[in-house]
Image: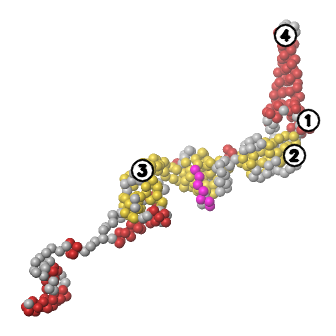
Amino acid sequence: MIKRTLLLPGAVASGFLIATYWPGAPDALRAALAGKLPAALGQTSAGRSEPLPAAAVEPAQKPAEEPGLVHLTDGQITKAGIRTDAVRGGRLARHLTVPGSIVPSANNTARIAVKTTGIVADLRKGLGDRVAKGEIVAMLDSRDIADAKSEYLAARVSADLQKTLYERDQSLWDKRISSEQQYLRSQASYRDLKVKEDSARRKLTFLGLSAAEIDALPNQPEAQFERQQIRSPIAGRIVDRRVDLGAAVGRDNLETELYSVVDLSKVWVDLAVTPGDLPLVREGQAVTVWTQATDERGEGRIVFIGPVLDQATRAARVVAELPNSDERWRPGSFVTAEIAISDKPVRVLVPADAVLTIAGKPTAFVKVENGFEARPVGVGRQDDRSVEITSGLEPGDTIAVANTFVLKAELGKAAAED
């Protein structure tokens, strides 16, 4: 007992010196010299050796999270602005970006004009008013119109009378009561008067009268013979009025145009394409148009490619037609247009923002039950907005397509903590 008491302080002192000047000494040696060898070996006070539990010799470790997994609740996903979408196929398109401007379609523009001299008796429409096709927009008093109507009615009466005589002479000739010469003279007279009637009718048509108006002339009061109805040839809106009430219009250096009407249900986009890009452009190609002022977007197609270059800009005029049923595209607006110069179908297509580079590999975040999984993917061709996926994703997978940088940051933070 005395021997053990004397040895214990010496062993403790030796252990202290070795731990100080020999840090690399084996743990067992330091434990022995410090008087802890029996405990290190698992000896009991009786001198028997017993194995220690594993927890006693190995420190407890935190369970490792699954690599590449970002845990987020639905509420956190919404708060972070992370938007998801299903993976699907699509079309890979390359675009040519060019400037342009909105102009009225020449196919949907009309000028309402008079074809004879007269006085404006009534103006029924003003700027901005809508008109229907064939609607009366003005009334004109014209001596020429009155003369043309009288000429037609006279020719019609003469032709009708001669027709009656011709039919009578034909009946008499068939019965051999009258001579053939009388029948032939009556036939020639009727044909001559019929030609004059048709000529007078065509003149009225040229002056702007409809077939219904001409047929109704025999019942029209003579006081209205000078009055002519001016109608709109198309449906649209009045964008210009050139005359005032009571103005003299017609030939001899007088104003002939009363209104300008534009149908804005379709508009044109005038595009300026450089000679170097012109071989990439074809009629029928799809065009996406937008304006930075309102962030409006529209889809149209190219309908015309100019064969000559503009002398001032050295660019070719390319025209695209744009649907505009709600009239949101106003002529005169400056726009930017993207012309789809190539269009190919692909099996898996995702937005470019959905693919990030993580550890040098293209990666997409796939939605799983408790968050997102960072999944390496193979990428193929790409256009301005989308990327073809060759491996790693299948149609129907749900991935993050917006604010994906938040997921990348969370993944990096989790890796740093590990």
Say which label, 4 or 3, has the lower sequence index. Answer: 4
| Residue 124 visible | yes
Q: Are marks 4 and 2 in contact (CB under 8 Å)?
A: no
**Label whose residue precedes the other's in the sequence (3 or 2):** 2
Mark number displayed over residue 121: 2
Residue at the spot of label 4: 173
- The residue type indicated by label 4 comes to Trp
The quadrant the C terminus occupies is bottom left
Residue at point 13% right, 79% down? 44
Distance, label 4 to label 3, CA atoms, is: 89 Å
**Residue at mark 4 to residue at mark 2: CA–CA distance:** 54 Å
Q: Nearer the viewer, residue 185 or 84?
A: 84
Q: Which is closer to the viewer, label 3 or label 2?
A: 3
Q: Residue at x 17, y 74 (%)?
A: 52
Asked which secondary structure carries label 1, the reply is helix
Distance between mark 3 and mark 1 Cα atoms: 78 Å
Q: Bin the neighbour count of mark 2 within 10 Å (Cα to Cα): few under 14, some 14-19, many 20 and up.
A: some
The reply to whether the magenta stretch includes residue 295 is: yes
**Which residue is identified by label 3?**
395
Specify the segment rendered in magenta.
Answer: 293-299
Please give left or right for residue 407 compared with residue 41 in the image. Answer: right
Mark 1 or mark 2: which comes first in sequence? 2
Q: N-terminal of the two: label 3 or label 1?
A: 1
Between discs 1 and 4, the one toward the N terminus: 4
User: Secondary structure under badge 3?
Assistant: loop
Report, in whole angstroms, how far the alpha carbon at label 3 lies from the one at label 2.
69 Å
| Residue behind mark 1 | 222
